[in-house]
Image: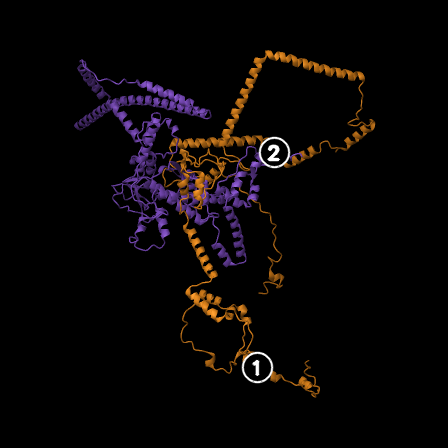
Chain colours: A orange, B purple
């Protein structure tokens, strides 16, 4: 507890050792001791030290100028800064001369064994684990190197030729002989691929796509293309006629008015009309839309008559059938002809079906949602034909051509590029982003007079 | 007990097909991996006979696979590799996210690699099968070799494509297997024949890269195709090189004696790659020796005499084709596309060179006097040599297609070229009418024939005289032979029409043996052929009549013109004399 400055000191007893200790001022002694300890820790103060002890004259240049990278490397080698707190910074020696410390594994080793181990290492005798490590590394390096050089370094069809081509060797024998080589003859299931065999890999080019075509060839090509285009235009026109032109264009107001009229058909909207109906209803008695059904019973006579009628009908039918049998005997020729006719018809139908099937098998199949469509033919207009190789103008792209060809051969399914619609994000400016801080925060009145 | 009721779609078409989604689930693969696997293994979606049943009653159109196909895929060991990839990606991604770059690098160094060798073998059990399916492979590889690195197409892939395609061209050059070439607006069409298989491929024109729109082509899928095709082409190259007694990877004679190369090679791979791309340096062989020429045996085949004759002709023309440019020296100007021309010229035995600064591998300079042809694609040149022809590149292509050397005159520098016709037209359709002028364009024999016909007309009178004298000589000989004597027995000759008739009958019988399946097709084919023949005959006849008329007209014209000239000359003379008389008179006055 510190007494206030201007208060007069009270007299205190210093009778006992403890009370004496309590009230004696030891500040100067403490300060001295503190200074002494600091000196012990940090060494002598700079004031006492001579210039020679503090500075050295740098007469020789540094042996090597280190680059920034090397300096960085060196810094990396130094112990990390985070551990500097753990080191002792004082120059005071450890008071406990014989401190108990856990020895490292290396220190704990038996010196005889240590010596022996060094000797073994020198003689090339390694421990199993070390050997394995070296071996593994070697194997790994080899593997990498092999993979680099292994590209196309063998004939994959050779083995087949050695044994597979020989018809005299039994299948079992073949498998048996190949078993040791590590190359088993794999039995591949004979599967039908869906590949379209009717379409060649590279279709023969139309002579009209030559860079310098003859007039006839080029004309043929253009005529082909024009015909195709005309077909497309015709189809488009037809679609327009059937869809767009059927409906006439109406103004929006008119449309809504007509809609309202249509929708309110049959609704009682006129008040006068309502009244009339009410009047009508009041005049006549109520009649249901579907009056209740009366259960009328038939008389005995009626039932008998009905039964008789049914029997008569049946007997007539029987008689007719009997008669037909006899008549059919005479009609045999006609029936035969009819049957033959029918069979012929069926045969024709069958043929037509087969033909259709054959044609269909040549066409690209529908593998997915979309159907294959023949791409536009490549051609160049007459003015694009320069007649020499230097000024040639290329048309079409080979990549698309290949891609479409794969689709045509049923190797790829026809797909359309998916366009994922991005969600609409509402944008707004955060308050304070565009703010003038001088106005809102510092509240400075910027006016021309202030300048 | 009553047996359990059969569940719907547990047998038949309903059980045969599996939707793509179900297949993914079964194989435990992602969609991308599944697509890749299917392309590599050559498994395609199917169209069922009855879609409703195959989709188990689910409406709409789904992508369906055959259940057996999926089961086949299930046995594929590379599925495990694909799964490894998945884990690998996850590990690398994690290491990257926590910035553990040491681990990341370790993972990347030990990345899993797909080995597709066994799949190539599996899909193409024999070398011939692989050759048969090489069209797509070559076209795509040639195309990809022109690509820069794009998203989904790594640089290494296009580099590999470039290397393999160039090596393949070398094999074609060594085998002299090229048969047809065609310059289209799309690219160069080539057709080669290897082991009896015709291989056609397209090479894009050598212009700058044109970016593709993503909407049209899925680059990822095409890249996967190319991934498989590069492996396939590599093995095909290996086999081809070994059958041609070449080293694979290719070696050059220069590399064998390092003393000749002045400096030590900085990078052997780049050195080789450049020479390979030059296409101009012959590869060194494992076994030295000439090629064996196979000759067709002369068997009398009787029935197939026509076919054998045709085959013999074909072989003969190919023999000519193989040595078409032998002994010729070509020099390419710098505006000419180097690669296709060097390839074609080297294929048929010619020597080529170009400007040294244009590309590596030039063997002689423009100043070399022994150059026979200089290929030029510009209207004129300042400095020209007398010792060589200056021709346009189309000459090379047309020569190959006609299989003999065409007259150079139509292809001179600055000349308007004759049309470049496609060699890929049906032979059957050749029966259509071709005007003699057009035929003369491509056939030397036809030119000769035309000339002959003209000369015949002129020498008609001479021949008439000759015939008369011949008749006299014959009469004399007959008189000498009338004397009695023993004659040597003569072999009774069969009338020629008997044999013909028999052949005809046999042909008709064979026609009858045509399967019902093909009969209609055959009929329509023959009808079309007949019709075409008829038309051609008609046009030919018309032409002949027309020509005759023209000839008569020309003759009369000639006579007329001579008369006219004489009359004109006479008038001019008259006029001149009159004028002179007039002048003389004036002077006198």
Q: Residues within 10 Å of mark 1 (few under 14, many from 20)?
A: few
Q: Which mark is residue A249?
A: 2
**The N terminus of chain B sits in image quarter:** top right
Q: Position of residue A334 (x, y in %)?
A: 57, 14
Q: Position of residue B28 (x, y in %)?
A: 56, 46
- Chain ID, mark 1: A
Does label 1 lie on the same chain as label 2? yes
Q: Nearer the viewer, residue B510 or B469?
A: B510
Residue B265 horizontal side relative to residue B484, left or right: right
Q: Nearer the viewer, residue B428 or B503?
A: B503
Q: Which mark is residue A368?
A: none
Which residue corresponds to the image point at 31% horizontal and 50% vertical from the top-left? Answer: B254
Q: CA distance from mark 2 to mark 1?
A: 105 Å
Q: Position of residue B353 (x, y in %)?
A: 31, 45
- Give the SS element for disc 2: loop
| Residue B565 occupies quadrant | top left
- Chain ID, mark 2: A
Q: Is residue A374 above or below residue B464?
A: below
Say whether disc 2 or disc 1 marks the residue closer to the N-terminus: 1
Residue B407 horizontal side relative to residue B508, left or right: left
**The C terminus of chain B sits in image quarter:** top left
- Give the SS element for disc 1: helix
Q: Nearer the viewer, residue A354 or A135?
A: A135
Residue B298 seen in the figure: yes
Q: Position of residue B501 (x, y in %)?
A: 35, 19
Among all residues in the image, which is located at the extreme bottom? A15
Q: Which mark is residue A35?
A: 1
Which of discs 2 and 1 lies nearer the camera? The answer is 1
Residue B552 horizontal side relative to residue A377, left or right: left
């Amino acid at each position: 507890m510190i007494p206030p400055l201007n208060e007069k000191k009270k007299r205190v007893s210093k009778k006992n050792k403890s009370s004496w200790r309590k009230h004696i001022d030891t500040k100067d002694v403490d300060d001295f001791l503190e200074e002494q300890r600091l000196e012990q820790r940090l060494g002598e103060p700079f004031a006492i030290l001579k210039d020679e002890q503090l500075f050295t004259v740098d007469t020789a240049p540094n042996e090597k100028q280190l680059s920034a990278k090397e300096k960085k490397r060196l810094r990396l080698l130094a112990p990390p800064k985070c551990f500097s707190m753990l080191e002792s910074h004082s120059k005071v020696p450890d008071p406990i001369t014989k401190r108990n410390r856990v020895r490292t594994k290396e220190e704990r080793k038996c010196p005889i064994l240590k010596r022996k181990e060094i000797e073994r290492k020198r003689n090339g005798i390694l421990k199993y684990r070390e050997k394995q490590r070296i071996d593994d590394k070697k194997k790994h390096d080899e593997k990498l190197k092999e993979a680099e050089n292994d590209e196309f370094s063998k004939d994959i069809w050779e083995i087949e030729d050695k044994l597979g081509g020989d018809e005299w060797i039994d299948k079992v024998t073949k498998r048996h002989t190949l078993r040791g080589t590590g190359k088993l003859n794999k039995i591949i299931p004979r599967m039908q691929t869906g590949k379209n065999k009717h379409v060649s890999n590279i279709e023969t080019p139309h002579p009209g796509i030559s860079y310098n075509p003859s007039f006839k060839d080029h004309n043929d090509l253009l005529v082909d293309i024009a015909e195709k285009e005309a077909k497309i235009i015709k189809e488009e026109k037809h679609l327009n006629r059937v869809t767009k032109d059927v409906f006439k264009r109406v103004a929006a107001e008119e449309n809504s008015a007509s809609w309202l009229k249509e929708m309110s058909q049959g609704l009682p909207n006129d008040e006068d009309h309502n009244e009339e109906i009410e009047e009508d209803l009041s005049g006549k008695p109520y009649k249901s839309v579907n009056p209740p059904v009366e259960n009328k019973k038939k008389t005995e006579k009626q039932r008998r008559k009905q039964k008789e009628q049914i029997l008569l009908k049946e007997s007539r039918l029987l008689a007719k059938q009997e008669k037909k049998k006899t008549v059919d005997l005479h009609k045999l020729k006609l029936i035969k002809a009819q049957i033959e006719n029918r069979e012929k018809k069926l045969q024709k139908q069958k043929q037509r079906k087969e033909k259709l099937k054959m044609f269909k098998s040549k066409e690209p199949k529908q593998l997915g949602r979309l159907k294959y469509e023949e791409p536009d033919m490549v051609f160049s207009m007459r003015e694009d034909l320069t007649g020499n190789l230097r000024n040639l103008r290329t048309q079409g792209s080979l990549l698309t051509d290949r891609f479409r060809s794969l689709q045509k051969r049923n190797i790829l399914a026809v797909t359309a590029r998916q366009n994922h619609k991005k969600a609409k994000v509402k944008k707004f400016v955060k308050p304070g982003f565009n703010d003038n801080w001088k106005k809102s925060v510092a509240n400075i009145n910027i006016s021309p007079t202030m300048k | 007990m009553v047996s359990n009721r059969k569940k719907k779609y547990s047998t038949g078409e309903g059980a045969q097909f599996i939707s793509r989604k179900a297949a993914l689930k079964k194989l435990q693969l992602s969609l991308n991996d599944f697509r890749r696997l299917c392309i590599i293994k050559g498994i395609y979606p199917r169209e069922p006979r009855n879609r409703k049943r195959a989709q188990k009653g689910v409406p709409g159109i789904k992508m369906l696979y055959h259940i057996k196909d999926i089961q086949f895929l299930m046995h594929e060991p590379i599925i495990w590799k694909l799964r490894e990839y998945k884990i690998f990606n996850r590990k690398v991604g994690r290491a990257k996210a926590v910035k553990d770059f040491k681990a990341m690098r370790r993972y990347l160094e030990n990345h899993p690699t797909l080995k597709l060798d066994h799949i190539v073998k599996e899909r193409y059990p024999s070398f011939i099968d692989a050759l048969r399916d090489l069209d797509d492979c070559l076209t795509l590889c040639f195309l990809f070799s022109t690509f820069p690195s794009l998203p989904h197409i790594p640089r290494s892939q296009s580099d590999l494509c470039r290397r393999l395609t160039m090596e393949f061209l070398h094999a074609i050059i060594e085998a002299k297997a090229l048969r047809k070439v065609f310059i289209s607006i799309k690219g160069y069409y080539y057709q080669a024949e290897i082991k009896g298989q015709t291989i056609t491929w397209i090479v894009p024109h050598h212009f700058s890269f044109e970016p593709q729109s993503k909407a049209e082509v899925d680059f990822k899928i095409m890249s996967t195709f190319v991934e498989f095709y590069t492996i396939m082409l590599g093995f095909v190259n290996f086999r081809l090189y070994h059958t041609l007694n070449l080293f694979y990877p290719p070696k050059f004679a220069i590399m064998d004696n390092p003393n000749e190369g002045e400096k030590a090679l900085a990078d052997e791979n780049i050195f080789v790659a450049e020479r390979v791309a030059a296409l101009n340096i012959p590869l060194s062989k494992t076994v030295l020796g000439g090629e064996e020429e196979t000759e067709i045996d002369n068997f009398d085949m009787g029935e197939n005499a026509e076919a054998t004759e045709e085959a013999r002709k074909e072989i003969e023309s190919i023999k000519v084709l193989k040595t078409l440019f032998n002994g010729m020296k070509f020099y390419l100007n710098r505006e000419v596309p180097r690669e296709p021309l060097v390839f074609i010229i080297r294929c048929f035995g010619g020597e080529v060179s170009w400007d040294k600064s244009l590309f590596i591998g030039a063997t002689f300079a423009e100043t070399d006097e022994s150059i026979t042809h200089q290929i030029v694609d510009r209207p004129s040149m300042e400095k020209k040599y007398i010792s060589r022809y200056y021709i346009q590149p189309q000459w090379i292509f047309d020569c190959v297609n006609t299989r003999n050397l065409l007259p150079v005159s139509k292809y001179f520098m600055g000349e308007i070229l004759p049309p470049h016709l496609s060699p890929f037209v049906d032979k059957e359709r050749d029966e259509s009418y071709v005007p003699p002028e057009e035929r003369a364009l491509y056939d030397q024999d036809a030119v000769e024939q035309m000339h002959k016909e003209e000369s015949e007309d002129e020498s008609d009178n001479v021949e008439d005289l000759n015939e008369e004298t011949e008749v006299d000589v014959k009469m004399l000989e007959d008189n000498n032979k009338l004397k009695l004597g023993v004659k040597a027995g003569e072999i009774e000759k069969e009338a020629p029409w008997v044999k013909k008739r028999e052949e005809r009958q046999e042909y008709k019988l064979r026609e009858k043996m045509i399967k019902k399946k093909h009969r209609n097709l055959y009929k329509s084919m023959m009808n079309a052929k007949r019709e075409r023949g008829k038309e051609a005959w008609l046009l030919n006849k018309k032409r002949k009549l027309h020509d005759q008329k023209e000839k008569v007209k020309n003759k009369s014209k000639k006579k007329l013109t001579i008369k006219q000239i004489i009359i004109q000359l006479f008038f001019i003379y008259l006029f001149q004399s009159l004028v002179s008389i007039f002048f003389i008179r004036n002077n006198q006055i």
